[in-house]
Amino acid sequence: DVKVTQSSRYLVKRTGEKVFLECVQDMDHENMFWYRQDPGLGLRLIYFSYDVKMKEKGDIPEGYSVSREKKERFSLILESASTNQTSMYLCASSPPDNEQFFGPGTRLTVL
Amino acid sequence: GEDVEQSLFLSVREGDSSVINCTYTDSSSTYLYWYKQEPGAGLQLLTYIFSNMDMKQDQRLTVLLNKKDKHLSLRIADTQTGDSAIYFCAESKGSNYQLIWGAGTKLIIKP
């Protein structure tokens, strides 16, 4: 079974802190994605990566950056967390042109 | 533009059928997906349909696709309390890694 894991289920940070969210997949998938999920808005793509060291902006990249140094790991970075970044963050991975497999999500609260 | 639309809520009685509807705008989509998100969890693929199919059945699930109207539906027969979840519709494009997501329909089961 494909497994996508995220480093934390719940995280509480203060405004201005630097936040790292880690995602690891164990199926050698080329593609990895970071979404945020907010009530009534569904999933919005922040960034995705189709190969090591490759990244593409999604629909809402502002205030975020990503890193993919190894194929299995895709990190989301909030350089200076703000209260409007309080959300559920979902990581996913997929082979090319195929279904996405999701991690359990990280609920981030920024105070 | 690209848009996938769903109702935000659906309420059904236990034992009845649930029909969750989705409309999309891009006629070039090759796959259409239904994902399920249970409370506190990530998303799991429920079923998918190729764009050249009209219907797909899998146990209690029936997916209907009307390409002319760009309408996708998910029918859950004999709805159970374990079906309580948010159901997301998503469309993919053949040459793109991304999925276009609906906002999700929360299925509420009444006893």
Image: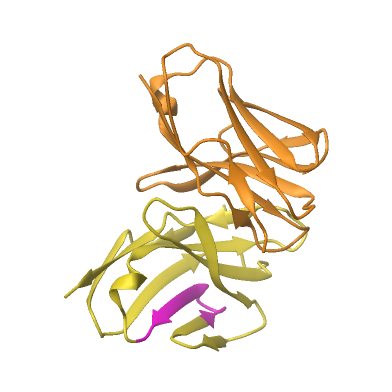
Chain colours: A orange, B yellow
Residue B106 makes an appearance in the image: yes
Which percent across, then down, holds residue A45?
Answer: 58, 42
Specify the segment rendered in magenta: B65-77
Residue at position x 56%, y 34% in the image? A60
In the picture as drawn, the residue positioned furthest to the top comes out as: A16
Q: How many marks?
A: 0
**Above or below, comparing residue A20 to residue B55 in the picture:** above
The quadrant the C terminus of chain A occupies is top left
Which percent across, then down, holds residue B106?
Answer: 33, 61
The quadrant the N terminus of chain A occupies is bottom right
Residue at position x 74%, y 63% in the image? B94
In the picture as drawn, the residue positioned furthest to the left comes out as: B111
**Above or below, comparing residue B31 to residue A62 in the picture:** below
Left or right placement of residue B69 versus residue B85 in this view? right
Residue B25 makes an appearance in the image: no
Residue at position x 81%, y 36% in the image? A70
Left or right placement of residue B46 versus residue B10 in this view? right
Asked if the magenta segment contains residue B44, the reply would be no
